[in-house]
Amino acid sequence: MRRKLVQAGGSLAVTLPAEVVQAFDLKKGMEVDVSVHPRTGAVIVRLGGREVDGGRVTKRFERSASALADRFAEAFEELAK
């Protein structure tokens, strides 16, 4: 999907379509990670924020990792054999 850059104070911004905002339940003020792929130059916007803060994993990352481990526990047990 193509989007135009818009002026936001002294910066430029990219707006997100309503479908994306609704699909990911985005709210004003939420943090996202923005990075640039080193090979392709693609700009990547990810939900969340930091996984590590001050050398320790964040509570949000801890919850996500725990939920993932629970969800795939059987598969991990099979792979460990």
Image (cartoon, grey):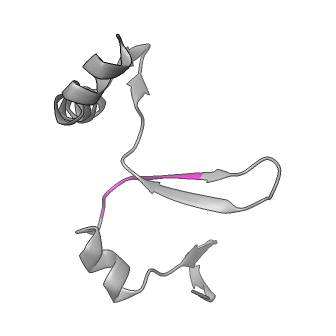
Q: Is residue 17 left or right of residue 61?
A: right
10 or 59: nearer the viewer? 59
Q: Is residue 63 above or below residue 46?
A: above
Which of the 4 image quarters holds residue 44?
bottom right
Q: Is residue 32 magenta?
A: yes
Image coordinates for residue 22, horizontal then vertical, percent: 25, 78
Which of the 4 image quarters holds residue 61?
top left
Which of the 4 image quarters holds residue 32?
bottom left
> Residue sitting at 37 percent across and 20 percent down?
79
Image coordinates for residue 78, horizontal then vertical, percent: 30, 21
Image coordinates for residue 56, horizontal then vertical, percent: 37, 15
**Residue lying at the far right of the rendered structure:** 39
Q: Is residue 47 magenta?
A: no
26 or 11: nearer the viewer? 26
> Residue sitting at 37 percent across and 53 percent down?
31
75 or 16: nearer the viewer? 75
Q: Which stretch appears magenta?
A: 29-34
Q: In the rendered view of the protein, which quadrant contains the N terminus?
A: bottom right
Q: Is residue 39 above or below residue 45?
A: above
> Residue sitting at 31 percent across and 76 percent down?
21
Q: In the rendered view of the protein, which quadrant contains the C terminus?
A: top left
Q: Is residue 22 above or below residue 45?
A: below
Number of numbered labels in the structure image: 0
Q: Is residue 41 left or right of residue 70?
A: right
Image coordinates for residue 77, horizontal then vertical, percent: 26, 18
